Amino acid sequence: DIQMTQSPSSVSASVGDRVTITCRASQGISSWLAWYQQKPGKAPKLLIYAASSLQSGVPSRFSGSGSGTDFTLTISSLQPEDFATYYCQQAKSFPITFGPGTKVDIK
Amino acid sequence: EVQLVESGGDLVQPGGSLRLSCAASGFTFSSYWMTWVRQAPGRGLEWVANIKQDGSEKYYVDSVKGRFSISRDNAKNSLYLQMNSLRVEDTAVYYCVPYSYGSGSYGDWGQGTLVTVSS
């Protein structure tokens, strides 16, 4: 199985900050990577697919990059509604696996 | 508009059984792989099982193999998860999600159904 790790596990940031979250796969997954945002009590929301493609309706301050084993999600200017937990997910092979999550909270 | 309505979650004792259902609408259900994803309280997301469009292929996470069974009824636009020999660690919100095979992602989610395994 492909293991996914994320760093940091949590980050405290202020509105307007640039935030970068890293995701690493235990083996190469090409660009088979997605990013999700989840707020408490809500279902996850797809932000990025295929490592760098922005899902329709998602603000352009979110961007994804990387391929192979190392990926990043960047929020260029953090907004109040962005405080949430972020997960990466690989789709190179079954079982599909998620990273453990990165919580972005208010500094 | 895509709608996914999960049901069947309940409080059940360890060793018990439960059947989850998901009613899907707003998309061509028979054209999609379907997935169950779960989330234990305060924990991260865990992929549980996948089923191909015609039901001919099924995949499970190791922790549920031999205990859970995923199935679908394309005529009813419905997805199911039969859960047997339930354990305390199966406690979670279970989401029914259509899998976009081309992008390898999950773009639409239901509200989930809560399964609690406790004595």
Image: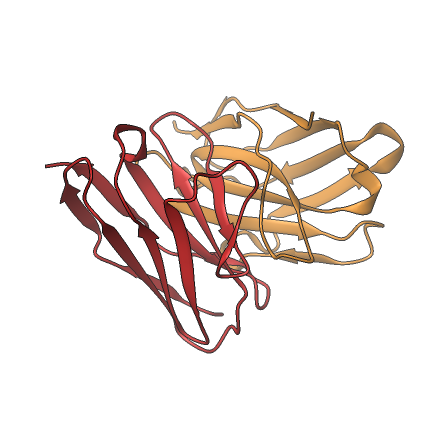
Chain colours: A red, B orange
Residue B39: x and y in percent read 43, 39
Is residue A97 found left or right of A12 in the rendered image?
right
Q: Which of the pair B73/B88 is nearer the observer?
A: B73
Is residue B9 found left or right of B91 in the rendered image?
right
> Which corner quadrant of the image does residue A64 belong to?
bottom left
Which residue: 40% across, 53% down?
A63
Compared with residue A71, is residue B25 higher up or lower down, i.e. above or below? above
Q: Which of the pair B78/B19 is nearer the observer?
A: B78
Which residue: 17% across, 47% down?
A11
Which residue: 32% across, 53% down?
A74
Q: Which of the pair B45/A66 is nearer the observer?
A: A66
Residue B79 in view here:
yes
Compared with residue A36, is residue B113 higher up or lower down, i.e. above or below? above
Residue A13: x and y in percent read 15, 42
Which residue: 85% across, 28% down?
B76
Image quadrant containing the C terminus of chain A: top left
Compared with residue B76, is residue B44 higher up or lower down, i.e. above or below? below
> Which corner quadrant of the image does residue B24 belong to?
top right
Residue B38: x and y in percent read 49, 40
Is residue B70 found left or right of B48 in the rendered image?
right
Residue B43 in view here:
no
Compared with residue A64, is residue B22 higher up or lower down, i.e. above or below? above
Q: Residue furthest left?
A: A107
Count how many numbered circles sit on residues in the image: 0
